[in-house]
Amino acid sequence: MSEPRPGLPDGCGFWLGTAAVFAALGAIGITIAVTVYRPPWLSAWFIAGAVVCALGCMAATWALVLYLAHKEAARHWCPDQRAHALGLELRGPAARPRGATAARAGAILTAANAASREEQARWLRPVLREINGDLRQAAAGVDKAHRERSYSGVRHEFDLSQTWEDNRWRLAALEGRGDLYDTLRDAYAGIARMYRITSRPGTAPTEAQGLPGVLEAIRKAEVAVGKELADIG
């Protein structure tokens, strides 16, 4: 849409033409006064001519003002007025965009957090399941050794998988799961110690080896792992 043309009273050309007419009429009156009257200053023709010339000067001045105003307005003129109407439709009330933006930001954060939790669960779930199997196996070995008062045939129950060593630093870095890591660390320290004890031929269970304490640490770790697996699904 092009810039609308100004109406007749608002156009510079109209006032310039008016100024020219006034100037011509005023010049005619002054010419008659100068030609007929001596001195011409007090004659009606001279006074009328001077007044009309003054009106012409005022019209010319107003034309200049309009020209400058139109030129300044053109610098800020939008070539497509429909864009303003469309912008107002899209913006709507002032409160709506802020609310929509806040809701959209909240939805993005929620989706990002959900994606982060799901990505974390993808590696944590199989790791904890593997560790849980090691814990059950070690608990069974401690029960058997304590019941039979012998380590014969239970050494493999304390042979930990590589899963713990491969993921211990990632487990330690989990936010809000310090208790889980602490119980796993205590349990695996006890299991590793039992593996070293059973590696010595002829060694029998003794009270100093602290089998009940090792079993308690393993049970605590099993409870913590079970709870975490239930949380992540």
Image (tube, rainbow, N blue to C red):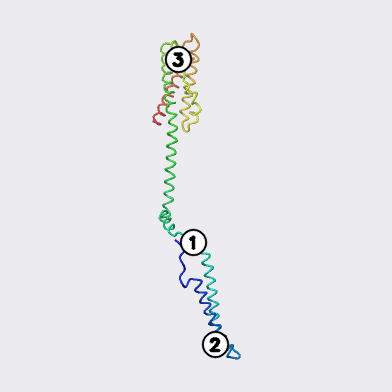
Is 56 located above or below residue 109 in the figure?
below
- Badge 3 element: helix
Nearer to us in this view, 136 or 162: 162
Q: Which residue is mark 2?
A: 45
Quadrant of the snapshot with the C terminus:
top left
Residue 137: percent from left, percent from top: 42, 18
Residue type at mark 1?
Trp
Residue 178: percent from left, percent from top: 48, 30
Quadrant of the snapshot with the N terminus:
bottom left
Q: Is residue 82 left or right of residue 20?
A: left
Q: Which residue is mark 3?
A: 156
Dot placed on the residue nearer the N-terminal end, 1 or 2 = 2
For image coordinates 46% across by 31% down, the residue present is 177
Residue type at mark 2?
Trp
Q: CA distance from mark 3 to mark 2?
A: 132 Å
Dot placed on the residue nearer the N-terminal end, 3 or 1 = 1
In the drawing, what numbered circle is on residue 96? Answer: none
Question: Between tags 3 and 1, which lies in front?
Answer: 1
Nearer to us in this view, 118 or 224: 118
Residue type at mark 3?
His
For image coordinates 54% across by 87% down, the residue present is 45
Q: Which residue is mark 1?
A: 77
